[in-house]
Amino acid sequence: MGRLRRSRVHKGIKDVSKKYRSKRKTKDLDQIQQDLVEENKLKIENAEPDADLPGMGKFYCIECNKHFVDNTSVLKHKGSKVHKRRLKQLRVPAYTQAEAEMGAGMGVGNETKISSLLEIKRQNDKKFSL
């Protein structure tokens, strides 16, 4: 009978697993949709150069929340499947607080609430159409 295995015993340590889970956390889709609004987009594009970021922060893909080293890598990225997949995800408008309350059953549930919710949804569709 052999010895018991003592390797790989750190699986249950909570802080280690949390560190690796949150290491590459990116912005959520609703935060990116807020960045795509014209006034926020201009602020991001005209940001000051930062020495800590790749390419001094000049080459940035807003949709994917990624910095790149040079312009050729940005152009290559914009033709990739990953970027096109993110664009498709961003076409779907983010949920509003009103939709969340209606889903939780906090709304009254009459026709006026539903019609106003549909109007809000149509306005968001127009705002975030790419």
Image: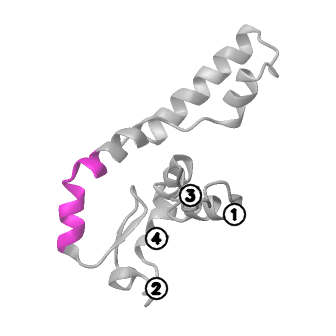
Query: Residue 14 or 102: which is nearer the viewer?
Result: 14
Q: Which mark is residue 67?
A: none
Q: Quote the CA–CA distance across marks 3 and 2.
A: 59 Å
How many marks can you see?
4
Q: Residue at x 56, y 53 (%)?
A: 31
Q: Quote the CA–CA distance across marks 4 and 3.
A: 58 Å
The three-letter code of the residue at mark 4 reads Ile
The numbered mark, 1 or 2, whose residue comes first in the sequence reads: 1
Point out the image quarter for the C terminus.
Answer: top left
Q: In front of the other: label 3 or label 2?
A: 3
Q: Quote the CA–CA distance across marks 4 and 2.
A: 9 Å
Number of other residues with Cα within 10 Å of mark 4, as a class: few under 14, some 14 to 19, many 20 or more: some
Figure quadrant of residue 104: top right
**Magenta-span inclusion, residue 61:** no
Question: Disc 4 on helix, strand or loop?
Answer: helix
Question: Disc 1 on helix, strand or loop?
Answer: helix
The three-letter code of the residue at mark 1 reads Asp
Q: Residue at x 67, y 28 (%)?
A: 99
Q: Residue furthest front?
A: 1
The numbered mark, 1 or 3, whose residue comes first in the sequence reads: 3
The numbered mark, 4 or 1, whose residue comes first in the sequence reads: 1
Q: Which residues are magenta?
A: 72-84
Task: Residue under label 4, please give it.
Answer: 44
The numbered mark, 4 or 3, whose residue comes first in the sequence reads: 3
Q: Quote the CA–CA distance across marks 4 and 1.
A: 33 Å
Q: Residue at x 42, y 82 (%)?
A: 53
Q: Quote the CA–CA distance across marks 1 and 2.
A: 35 Å
Image x and y of residue 62, in percent: 40, 61
Task: Residue under label 3, please give it.
Answer: 3
Task: Residue under label 2, please give it.
Answer: 48
Task: Residue under label 1, please give it.
Answer: 15
